[in-house]
Image: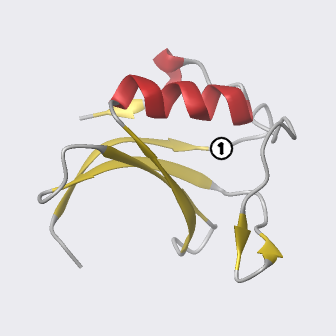
Amino acid sequence: MADHRLCCKMKLGGSHRPTGKTRHYRSGEACPPPAELRIVQFSDDPGFYLLYHDATGTELTDTYHESIAEAKAQAEFEFEIKPEEWECS
């Protein structure tokens, strides 16, 4: 796996339920709702990945974005997370 830096993270709580506007699948099966979202950038890639993790820290799926702002917008679309709720480094 390539080196990466963690840009932002967000633990999902009771106020952050899936909106149902998107569905993620892994190996043909629907992914469960994530417990945490992370925005990372890999050293060999100019874009940003929105990673969806379960409660044990296992990655469920990801989406690719041109900017951190686009990744945050995707999370807002899916979970109604406001940009200021993120913990960013």
Q: Quadrant of the image for the C terminus?
A: top left
Residue drawn at the location 40% of the way across and 23% of the way down: 69
Residue drawn at the location 31% of the way across and 50% of the way down: 40
Q: Quadrant of the image for the N terminus?
A: bottom left
Label 1 crowd (10 A; few <14 / some 14-19 / many >=20): some
**How far from the left and from the top, in percent, is residue 44?**
12, 60
Q: Secondary structure at mark 1?
A: loop
Residue at the extreme right: 20
Residue drawn at the location 72% of the way across and 36% of the way down: 78
- Side (left or right) of 31 relative to 60: right
Which amino acid lies under the numbered mark 1 shown in the image of this protein? Leu
**Of 85 and 67, the residue lying toward us:** 67
Q: Is residue 34 above or below residue 18?
A: below
**How far from the left and from the top, in percent, is residue 84?**
47, 16
Residue 42 figure quarter: bottom left
Residue at the spot of label 1 = 12
Q: Is residue 9 above or below residue 74?
A: below
Q: Is residue 68 above or below residue 28?
A: above
